[in-house]
Image: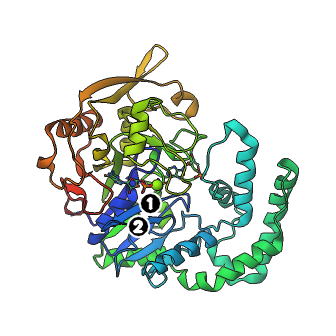
């Protein structure tokens, strides 16, 4: 029986990870974020009430479940407490159940300033980041100059580190981008204003997870972003700045790889992308608009419209392979309900070559021309269906075809945003 399950986005993010993590939390003692930051926007709907989480694990709505932010996550103290306050207003107690790793790099105002300045300077070549300072914060980590959560316990050293970083950032902001410098006092005072509240949340994530695991508790690992936004394997440079693949959970949470038993790949029944970068099956016609409208495809963090397109099997093959996906959860099937015909991309043409798996990097991916096959739609309502056999025959045919094309079974189907609008084919924790 699977003890620990990892939920991974298999496309360009926003596949519906949050909904499924919340739903699976019924079975676990702990939910862990292991990469990304508040660039994520994970939407949970419970009894018609919507909650959008950015940094806090999507298990938080379940009383008694412990939530963890591992070392692979970049943490904005400001965003963290905004989210904690929002949840508090909704009656959810966060601070008694959340542990943050001491080694988490912090996102500070100069990271956001540089993210914005760079994007503005790039003009139409911009990445379309979420503007949350994610890229610069991860750069600091790799450059070994991050201010980390643990630094809040040594204020003289913290001041020194901030000053050293500002020397680097302000040169870039002023002289490369013509922006105002960021003042030391602004950064330090803001950080100090949060310090006493963050300090009690800091704890040994890695060891606590190990102890929960050893005593038989199940753990859910919550991926953010999606495999095609992964810093190594995505459409580089139009990617985020962390590894979003299943393998990242081990390093990012500080647990052994043997602790990851079941990889649940979240797969939207079509494809979306927010921000710039190549997208082979993108639709620019009325069908694209229909998917955007029916799927309410607007970024949960930035409100930007998401680009929409057909299901892309070669992209999925890459993603399922890299993540070792055990079972797929197909989400937003209901969004396709009204279509008379549905296309599936089965491979790409690149010049006179045909390929069946997504190449690496944006230069190659932008050369991919999709090869489509067409299936009949079902043109009936699947919204809220809870049993597989209650799905219309053509919807079942569509799911069957997706499985055949990518070679991984479907374990869950999602037919609406609410927790209960879910079909279980094989429960990941019963596997
Ligand atoms: P995440 O980032 O992967 O957690 O996904 P987001 O929350 O950013 O985006 C998914 C959107 O689709 C949210 O608005 C969800 O409420 C919604 N959603 C999730 N599953 C379904 C589904 O099966 N059908 C419909 N219609 N909406 C869904
Ligand atoms: P969830 O977890 C969709 C995209 C941004 C941009 C690129 C880099 O909700 O699926 P960044 O701010 O990370 O430097 O932006 O990555 N991006 C996402 N797109 N869903 C997300 O998260 C995303 N997080 C980042 O739009 O193209
Ligand atoms: Mg999202």
Label 2: element kind:
loop
Q: Position of residue 330 (x, y in %)?
A: 29, 47
Q: What residue lies at 63% left-to-right and 67% top-to-bottom? A: 105
Q: Residues within 10 Å of mark 2 (few under 14, many from 20)?
A: many
Residue 42: which disc? 1
| Image position of 180 with respect to 77: above or below | above
Q: Position of residue 291 (x, y in %)?
A: 39, 40
Point out the image quarter for the C terminus.
Answer: bottom left
Q: Residue furthest left?
A: 389
From the Cβ of disc 1, is ligand 1 less than 8 Å away?
Answer: yes
Q: What residue lies at 19% left-to-right and 53% top-to-bottom? A: 385
Q: Of 29 and 207, which appears nearest the observer?
A: 29
Does the rendering let one see residue 295? yes
Q: Position of residue 363 (x, y in %)?
A: 58, 29
Q: Residue furthest right?
A: 175
From the Cβ of disc 2, is ligand 1 less than 8 Å away?
Answer: yes
């Amino acid at each position: 029986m699977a003890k620990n399950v990892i939920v991974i986005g298999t496309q360009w993010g926003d596949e519906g990870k949050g909904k499924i993590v919340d739903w699976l939390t019924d079975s676990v003692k702990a939910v862990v974020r292991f990469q990304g930051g508040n660039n994520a926007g994970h939407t949970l709907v419970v009894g018609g009430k919507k909650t959008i989480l950015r940094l806090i694990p999507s298990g938080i709505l379940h009383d008694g479940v412990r939530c963890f932010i591992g070392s692979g996550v970049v943490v904005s103290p400001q965003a963290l407490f905004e989210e904690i306050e929002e949840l508090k207003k909704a009656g959810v107690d966060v601070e008694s159940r959340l542990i943050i790793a001491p080694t988490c790099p912090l996102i500070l105002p100069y990271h956001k300033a540089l993210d914005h300045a760079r994007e503005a300077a790039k003009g139409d070549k911009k990445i379309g980041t979420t503007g949350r300072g994610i890229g610069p914060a991860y750069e600091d980590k790799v450059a070994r100059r991050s201010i980390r959560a643990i630094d809040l316990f040594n204020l003289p050293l913290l001041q020194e580190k901030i000053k050293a970083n500002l020397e680097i950032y302000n040169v870039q902001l002023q002289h490369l981008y013509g922006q105002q410098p960021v003042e030391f006092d602004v950064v330090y005072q803001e950080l100090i204003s949060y310090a006493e509240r963050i300090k009690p949340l800091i704890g040994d994530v890695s060891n606590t997870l190990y102890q929960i695991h050893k005593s038989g508790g199940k753990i859910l690992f919550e991926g953010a972003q999606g495999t095609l936004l992964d810093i190594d394997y995505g459409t580089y440079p139009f990617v985020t700045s962390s590894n979003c693949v299943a393998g990242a959970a081990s390093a990012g949470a500080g647990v052994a790889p043997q602790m990851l038993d079941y990889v649940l790949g979240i797969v939207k029944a079509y494809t979306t992308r927010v921000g710039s970068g190549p997208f082979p099956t993108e639709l620019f016609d009325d069908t694209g608009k229909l998917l955007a409208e029916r799927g309410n495809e607007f970024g949960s963090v930035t409100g930007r419209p998401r680009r929409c397109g057909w299901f892309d099997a070669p992209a999925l093959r890459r993603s399922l392979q890299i993540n070792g996906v055990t079972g797929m959860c197909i989400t937003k099937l209901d969004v396709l309900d009204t279509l008379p015909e549905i296309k599936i991309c089965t491979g790409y043409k690149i010049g006179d070559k045909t390929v069946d798996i997504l190449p690496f990097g944006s230069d190659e991916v932008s050369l991919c021309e999709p090869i489509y096959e067409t299936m009949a739609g079902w043109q009936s309502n699947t919204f809220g269906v809870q049993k597989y056999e209650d799905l219309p025959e053509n919807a079942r045919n569509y799911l069957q075809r997706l499985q055949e094309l990518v070679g991984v079974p479907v374990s869950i189907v999602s037919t609406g945003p609410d927790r209960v609008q879910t079909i279980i084919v094989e429960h990941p924790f019963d596997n």
